[in-house]
Amino acid sequence: MKCASVHFLPLFNTLMYGQHASHVDLHVSSSTSTDSSYFFLLQMDFRLLLIASLSAVLGGGWAQQEGSVCIKANTQSCGECIQVAESCGWCSDADFLTVGESKSARCDDLESLKKRNCANIENPRGSITIDKNKEVTNRKDKTEKLKPEQITQIQPQKLSLTLRSGEPQTFKLKFKRAEDYPIDLYYLMDLSFSMKDDLENVKNLGTDLMREMREITSDFRIGFGSFVEKTVMPYISTTPARLINPCTGNQNCTSPFSYKNVLKLTNNGDEFNKLVSQQQISGNLDSPEGGFDAIMQVAVCEEHIGWRNVTRLLVFSTDAGFHFAGDGKLGGIVLPNDGRCHLENNMYTMSHYYDYPSIAHLVQKLSDHNIQTIFAVTEEFQPVYKELKNLIPKSAVGTLSSNSSNVIKLIIDAYNSLSSEVILEHTRLPEGVSIAFKSICKNGVEGPEENGRKCSNISIGDEVSFVISIESQKCPAHGKSETIKIKPLGFTEEVEVVLNFICDCECAAHGETNSKICNLGHGTYECGACKCNEGRIGRLCECSKDEVRTEDLDANCRKDNGTDICSNNGDCVCGTCECKKRDNTAELYSGKYCECDNFNCDRSNNKLCGGHGRCVCRKCVCDANYTGSACDCSLDTSTCLAKNGQICNGRGTCECGICKCTNPKFQGPTCEICPTCPGVCTEHKDCVQCRAFEAGEKKDTCERDCSYFQLIKVKDRDKLPQPTDQSFPLTHCKERDANDCWFYYTYAIRNDTKEVYVVENLECPAGPDIIPIVAGVVAGIVLIGLALLLIWKLLMIIHDRREFAKFEKEKMNAKWDTGENPIYKSAVTTVVNPKYEGK
């Protein structure tokens, strides 16, 4: 199976070299016992979902295309037919085929087979059977203690699906996170020299972590392991002194080792503290450590570690990077890691023999053993391990302080993060089988993450569900059932899905081998047709492949000596014409010599047989009420009826639903239009006037010229017949006589009788009233005079006011002369005393 490729950052371009993944694209190896395709097939599965969504949008057009696929597949048996598409069926009626049709014509879409009156259509359908459906655990008594095997978090547990090609089967899977679920935690620590201060803080980890985890679960176990590096050059110094004490100076270190299982999983926190306190730091030469070797052994050595079928947590603590597949070549180690347990006396003994595992290999093993990984690393290596986290599902990264003092909080936070999300995975799918997920998460919200495989922010007791659709595109070569498993990542529980494939029709089981019908035993008669033995061909297996092209057989396929074999529209198979198929599956060749077809008939309006008939052997067979070579002549006369109920208004003939007017003055679709004819009202005005009012131009010849209609008088216009009240044509008229008086009448033809309803009273205009006119004229003259006087008075007032204002202005501007009068003499005389000296 071709898997989708997932490309990584350049930092990890060489991480994938190993036994189970040959290059960086992370293709799934066929040699893996349990495939981790949940991670690699998402893109392909998503494309299948898009195809399914597209078929729903295109609707009928898609169905029509599928119908053509059934015929184009050219299947020779019912089993082959039902593998083509979900909409294909096989007609097993013995007399279904007409002359010239091949066996493959039995395979068509269901609607086409029904239209051809097939009585027995083979159309097997898929189904779903739930074999085990234990309810998820719902604790009513919070103090109740349950064993791990008594807790159910996923439902149902086993199903059987019967799959037909192209028909998806959908079921619902429920998950509920259980309360007080047991936890196993294994602490894997880097004991290289740079982790010396971290070891001191980890020595009391057992009891402290046990106390914190008791708030999450009452069933908690903890274990401890350590790692350094492969015990070969250039990773460590192999001099005798350095093998005993790899540290420099006065540091007392233990001998280097690859991986050591210090403490099996236990619920005794004091024992953890005791054994960890006895550990010593070791050393190596290079910065990256051999942690991947240790992770592999922790995952696969279940008995040595003591893993239970509960939540499994692996805490990986380090302050350095890691070696991966291919790095072993530096030490002369070329054999890929075999992924098996090699612990003797709790020590990994094959580090010098097998290379480091690849990331893909670790992903597979961690998934197989349901282990969730927590990387507790220092700030310096956060970017590297975050990239690694993206490659390993159900893993988390926490920032470890320089001396590991925050390790408990880191573990608690990482566990809460991991346990709050559910991601479904599945084992390897059989060839041709696809799977699609749709998650219905908390509060009924549809989860878009991981293509519908993931739900986040799940608390204890929350219930989520997944709608899973499985579809097969073809029947497996062996035809046997297959089993796949679906489970949430990091959990031990799983759903077993047994896939059974519909590879043949039910009627095939009742087939008659070596049947006499099939040319005296040259084939198996099943599902209404012969399934020929090897080397035989023909509708009834009447011919050997060696006899196909002979002159005698070809002569049977000619209508006469002057025609082509099968009219050049088919192939001569065993002396019988099998007509060709056209790209348009609705167009068919037929006949003993393929001389007929259903698409070369006369056309009208660019439609075959005018859209009103069938093309049978190049001639139109018209529907009822149609005739003509192209069925373009309608025998229905309803389109020729005029408003008076007569065909073509009595002035023409109806031919092919169209009026042909015999009177040249009349025209229109029903010969009712006469441009040169007077109107109905004008035509009958004089006769109505002379008979109703004894007036008009025909007053003297009224009895002779105007006795062709029946006259009925009514008192007022409301009594006249209305068009909506009549089932026959009716015309309302309003005419004026010589005295300018109006008269109203209706003209109608009912049962060949002409009827005229007329209002008996004329409407004449009244004469003028002199008094109001004279009074109005006098009043008008008086009012006009008053208006003129008022206007004159207003103008005079305005003029006087302007003159007075002008006078006042000139008065203010006047200036008087202030000079002295020459005649005037003052009455006062002033005399000066000459003797006066001012004393």
Image (cartoon, rainbow, N blue to C red):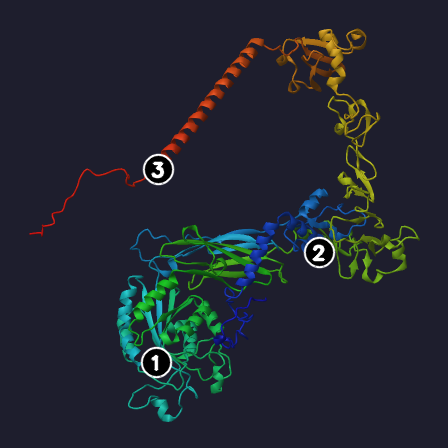
Read off the residue under disc 3. Answer: 814
Say which amino acid is labelled 3: Ala
The answer to whether residue 144 is visible is yes
Say which amino acid is labelled 2: Ala
Read off the residue under disc 1. Answer: 191
- Mark 3 or mark 2: which is in front? 3
- Dot 1 falls on a residue whose secondary structure is loop
Residue 637 against residue 312 in the figure, above or below = above
Residue 654 against residue 182 in the figure, above or below = above
Read off the residue under disc 2. Answer: 73
- Dot 3 falls on a residue whose secondary structure is loop
Query: Could you tell me how far apart the alpha carbons at marks 1 and 3 are, in whole angstroms?
Result: 126 Å
Decide if residue 447 is on the left or right side of residue 115.
left
Say which amino acid is labelled 1: Leu
- Mark 1 or mark 3: which is in front? 3
Front one among 637 and 314: 637
Residue at 78% across / 50% down in the picture?
Answer: 101
| Residue 162 x, y percent position in the rendering | 57, 54
Examine the image and state in which quarter residue 749 appears: top right
Front one among 433 and 377: 377
Decide if residue 291 is on the left or right side of residue 555.
left
Decide if residue 212 is on the left or right side of residue 573.
left
Q: Residue furthest front?
A: 834
N-terminal-most mark, 2 or 1: 2
- Dot 2 falls on a residue whose secondary structure is loop
N-terminal-most mark, 3 or 2: 2
Query: Could you tell me how far apart the alpha carbons at marks 2 and 1 are, in whole angstroms?
Result: 66 Å
Examine the image and state in which quarter residue 293 appears: bottom left
Query: Could you tell me how far apart the alpha carbons at marks 3 and 2 are, in whole angstroms?
Result: 125 Å
